[in-house]
């Protein structure tokens, strides 16, 4: 894969992940060796600044980049720019053109409520207000036949309203456009002529599926975040071109990679970009260690996220609600119909603020100090106590590990913040208050683990907990004990694990086409034609990738979504490679899958085909790798540290640097193992073993 003239130049792959508090940069060579890994403070007002800062730091850390000995072959990026644009309501001034009579679909939503027993529900406000939701005279039947032809006069009237409103982005979503997109395409051509500066998103392109609310919501979000994503990606592409990097890949919500060109076209697929990379890396770690079932636990500076890997495969869901929580309250969120790695997320990170509610009850999060001003101990203007400050009070953090704290760790400022806001009002000691903050944070995150396991019929004791993120290894052992998990796994470079995951991802597209027909009258040729149409779409997408794609190396996976007649939700079944099965075989596979999922059969109910799905996977690199080892850090000055417990007793903890550990060496708790950007906290009656790949396996030793 090396071009002529580059034989003497070593290649490097750069992974970049943006978090709410820090952004991580990792550089790996072709042998899977980590050349450098570091953090830079995130820049929420302009996320691109943190990425550019990280790229500029590479020249200082890797002299080979400056003298030409090292070639940055590709950059892989997990980004929060689309998520932030949605959450912070910084998207484009968006309008919606929809079928006459369907203007209020966004506000009517679904009957399901975030909290069944709450009388006063908080619902996320629509991204397009009523004045910019315009009706077009047209109508299509569910089978694609035209009921009302497109009335172009209504289109031109709508365009005049859009022109006066200075609209920046436009979503077009007509009833049953998934079955026949001719009206959407006609309107698109008119708008492109009349309003060439407006960003267009069509539901038949972005989300050609049944479900009017979900389809409308998805295409509106795609339009809403489009300008912010485009500006961001184009700025990064310009910066990378100055480094001679032409291969720029972005992680999508489904854990796959896409080119910047396709990311600009479908920005709604980036809403869960960053967290997805960490789940992919967790699955790769399971492959390396021979562990089938894992729980990925990612705790950074702002949020904590949990996902499940079963059979070494991340669990994908086809629909999710973005921006679901506001000020700690479930507000419904914005529906997105798009494949995404299934995650649970709460506002519990190192920067989560501890506070007292009006009743004097201690709470932790979801508000975060972020990177500006940050925790009090960072000495950047923060005055409120955070989870990081609680650790600083107790002494579980080392000043040398906090790259985001320019003046080092100010333990005195952490103590002052905890004393003022928590200890004094509750008449507690400072240490007692710090322990209480950590215990509440642990309880919140343990409940999140139960959410993705116990509440879904899974036993957490059947899983290993993989801890990463800057704060993940600090809390993982406590959470594992809380929920009964026996094994905790801490990968190499846990603070940069999601950035590494970006490099491990494959190019992936999940394409869908709704058909909506009874299986008993379905013609196999009709289904085959739908799959061929999806394959043509896939080829067009792959043609826009940043690297040449060998058609022989592309893998295709076919699925059918079916349901019993009269039901709302469908169940997917995978098709075997080769010819399409008969209707009878498809029906039997569905009925068996339905019985396995729900425990009963409905023999007298007819079966409907709802959609066909095509998964497209392309691996960029021929070989697989997993970074091993540990980056050297300054050896701790103190090899033992006294930590005050909640009851006032003092316990002696060992302190080690992770790179000092030999393969096979075992560390008995209580111990603190310091690493780049994180600390592994091994509790009493636990032992951590450092294996040959540099992975820490922590297990109970009672």
Image (cartoon, rainbow, N blue to C red):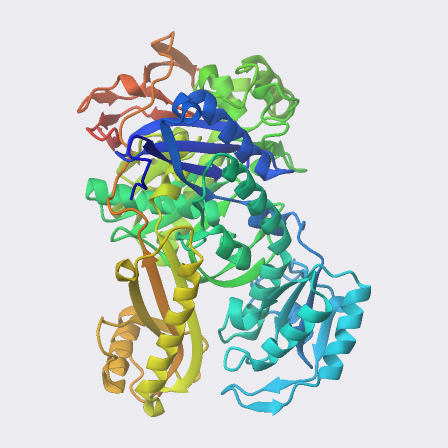
Q: Is residue 612 above or below residue 73?
A: below
366 relative position to 294: left or right: right
Q: Is residue 244 above or below residue 210?
A: above
Res. 486 image quadrant: top left
- Residue 403 locus on image (x, y percent): 50, 22
Residue 475 seen in the current view? no
Q: Residue furthest top?
A: 637
- Residue 669 locus on image (x, y percent): 29, 21
* Quadrant into which the C terminus falls: top left
434 relative position to 631: left or right: right
235 relative position to 631: left or right: right
Identify which residue, 259 or 363, lies in the foreground: 259
Residue at the image position 32 percent from the left and 31 percent from the top: 9
Res. 553 image quadrant: bottom left
Residue at the image position 36 percent from the left and 34 percent from the top: 12
- Residue 365 locus on image (x, y percent): 57, 38
Q: Residue furthest front?
A: 5
Identify which residue, 649 or 537, lies in the foreground: 537
Q: Is residue 119 above or below residue 501?
A: below
Residue 445 seen in the current view? yes
- Residue 42 locus on image (x, y percent): 56, 33
Residue at the image position 66 percent from the left and 22 percent from the top: 381
Residue at the image position 49 percent from the left and 87 percent from the top: 143
Res. 696 image quadrant: top left
85 relative position to 663: left or right: right
* Quadrant into which the N terminus falls: top left
Q: How many marks?
A: 0
Identify which residue, 658 or 155, lies in the foreground: 155
């Amino acid at each position: 894969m090396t071009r002529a003239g580059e034989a003497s130049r070593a290649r490097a792959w750069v992974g970049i992940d943006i978090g709410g508090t820090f952004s991580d940069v990792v550089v790996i060579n072709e042998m899977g060796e980590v050349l450098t890994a570091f953090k830079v403070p995130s820049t929420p007002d302009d996320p691109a600044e943190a990425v550019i800062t990280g790229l500029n730091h590479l020249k200082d850390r890797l002299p080979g980049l400056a003298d030409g000995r090292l070639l940055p072959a590709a950059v892989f990026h997990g980004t929060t720019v689309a998520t932030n644009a949605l959450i912070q309501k910084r998207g484009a001034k968006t309008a919606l053109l929809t079928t006459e009579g369907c203007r209020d679909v966004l506000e009517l939503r679904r009957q399901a409520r975030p909290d069944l027993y709450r009388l006063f529900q908080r619902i996320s406000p629509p991204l397009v207000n009523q004045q910019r939701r315009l009706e077009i005279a047209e109508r299509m039947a569910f089978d694609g036949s035209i009921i009302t032809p497109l009335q172009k006069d209504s289109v031109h009237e709508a365009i005049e309203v859009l022109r006066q409103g200075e609209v920046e982005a436009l979503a077009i979503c007509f009833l049953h456009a998934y079955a026949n997109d001719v009206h959407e395409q006609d309107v698109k051509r008119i708008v492109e002529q009349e309003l060439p500066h407006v960003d267009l998103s069509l539901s038949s392109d972005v989300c050609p599926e049944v479900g009017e609310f979900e389809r409308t919501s998805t295409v509106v979000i795609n339009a809403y975040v489009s300008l912010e994503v485009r500006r961001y990606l184009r700025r990064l592409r310009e910066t990378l071109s100055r480094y001679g990097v032409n291969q720029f890949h972005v992680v999508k919500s489904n854990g796959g990679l896409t080119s910047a060109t396709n990311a600009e076209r479908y920005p709604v697929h980036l809403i869960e970009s960053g967290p997805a990379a960490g789940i992919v890396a967790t699955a790769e770690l399971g492959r390396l260690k021979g562990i089938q079932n894992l729980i990925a636990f990612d705790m950074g500076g702002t949020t904590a996220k949990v996902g499940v890997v079963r059979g070494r495969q991340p669990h994908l869901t086809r629909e999710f609600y973005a921006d679901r929580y506001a000020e700690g309250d479930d507000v419904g969120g914005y529906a997105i119909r798009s494949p995404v790695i299934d995650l649970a997320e709460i506002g519990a990170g190192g920067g989560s603020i501890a506070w007292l509610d009006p009743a004097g009850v201690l709470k932790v999060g979801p508000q975060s100090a972020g990177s500006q001003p940050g925790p009090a101990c960072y000495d950047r203007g923060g005055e409120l106590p955070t989870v990081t400050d609680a650790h600083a009070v107790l002494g579980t953090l080392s000043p040398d590990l906090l790259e985001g704290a320019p003046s080092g760790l100010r333990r005195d400022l952490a103590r002052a913040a905890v004393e003022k806001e928590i200890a004094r009002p509750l008449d507690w000691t400072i240490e007692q208050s710090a322990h209480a903050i950590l215990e509440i944070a642990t309880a919140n995150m343990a409940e999140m683990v139960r959410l993705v396991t116990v509440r879904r019929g899974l036993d957490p004791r059947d899983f290993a907990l993989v801890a990463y993120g800057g704060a993940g290894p600090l809390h993982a052992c406590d959470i594992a004990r809380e929920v009964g998990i026996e094994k905790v796994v801490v990968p190499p470079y846990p603070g940069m694990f999601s950035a590494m995951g970006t490099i491990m991802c494959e190019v992936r597209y999940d394409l869908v086409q709704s058909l909506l027909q009874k299986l008993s009258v379905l013609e196999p040729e009709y289904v085959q034609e739908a799959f061929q149409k999806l394959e043509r779409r896939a080829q067009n997408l792959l043609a826009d990738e940043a690297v040449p794609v060998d058609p022989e190396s592309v893998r295709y996976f076919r699925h059918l979504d079916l349901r019993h007649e009269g039901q709302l939700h469908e169940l997917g079944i995978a098709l075997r490679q080769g010819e399409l099965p008969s209707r009878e075989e498809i029906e039997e596979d569905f009925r068996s899958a339905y019985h396995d999922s729900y425990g009963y059969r409905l023999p007298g109910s007819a079966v409907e085909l709802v959609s066909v799905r095509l998964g497209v996977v392309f691996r960029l690199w021929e070989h697989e790798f997993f970074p091993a080892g540990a980056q050297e850090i300054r050896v701790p000055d103190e090899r033992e540290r006294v930590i005050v417990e909640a009851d006032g007793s003092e316990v002696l903890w060992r302190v080690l640097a992770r790179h000092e550990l030999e393969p096979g060496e075992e560390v008995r708790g209580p111990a603190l193992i310091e690493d780049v950007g994180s600390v592994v906290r091994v509790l009493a009656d636990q032992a951590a073993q450092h294996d040959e790949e540099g992975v820490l396996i922590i297990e109970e030793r009672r």
